[in-house]
Amino acid sequence: MNTIGMELAALQGVMGGAVPFFLGLVVVLVLLGAFWLGMRVRRREPATPTPEEQPKLPEGGPVVEEIEMREADEMPTDGGCLTPHEMPASGNRSTRRAADQTPLKWNRNSSGGFGSGGPGHT
């Protein structure tokens, strides 16, 4: 092997180890920069509230969920047309408390899918 070939082999050996080292160094520097930036952002955030600043329960205890059956308001049947501003609840579909408060039961013979195209029972 001549001297040029040996020099190229030595240069390849040095470059082969130097390139991954510098790439690793760049990755470490980027990670350190991200950590430093995250700490700066965290320092600007407001402090966590103290136990005295935490929300408290109302005097009467926790709020209870109210479940009721609702039904849609009926449209007038006098034959006239309504414009949107004449509709109850500003054109949105309004509801009222239903007289019958028994919850609807699932029907075993119903498919349960809208537009499924099936007969609805097996």
Image (cartoon, helix red, strand yellow):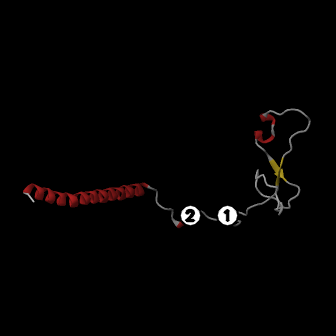
Q: Position of residue 48 (x, y in %)?
A: 49, 62
Residue 25 vs 95, above or below: the answer is below
Residue 8 in the image, given as x and y percentages of width and height: 14, 56
Q: CA distance from mark 2 to mark 1?
A: 13 Å
71 and 3: which is toward the camera: 3
Query: How many residues crowd mark 1 within 10 Å: few (<14), some (14–19), many (20+)?
Result: few
Q: Position of residue 96 (x, y in %)?
A: 83, 50
Instruction: Tell me, for residue 58, which label it has, or none.
Output: 1
Question: Which quadrant holds residue 100?
Answer: bottom right
Q: Give amino acid for label 2.
A: Gln
Picture quadrant of residue 5: bottom left
Q: Secondary structure at mark 1?
A: loop
Asked if the residues shown at circle 2 and circle 1 are in contact, with their CB atoms under 8 angstroms apart, the answer is no
Residue ID at (51%, 62%): 49
The percent coordinates of residue 119 (x first, y second) are: 82, 55
Label number found at residue 54: 2
User: Looking at the image, is 122 positioned above or below residue 77?
Assistant: below
Residue at figure coordinates x 90%, y 34% from the top left: 79
Q: Is residue 95 left or right of residue 13?
A: right
Q: Amino acid at mark 1?
A: Pro
- The label shown at residue 107 is none
Q: Quadrant of residue 82?
A: top right
Q: Residue at x 76, y 50 (%)?
A: 115
- Element at badge 2? loop
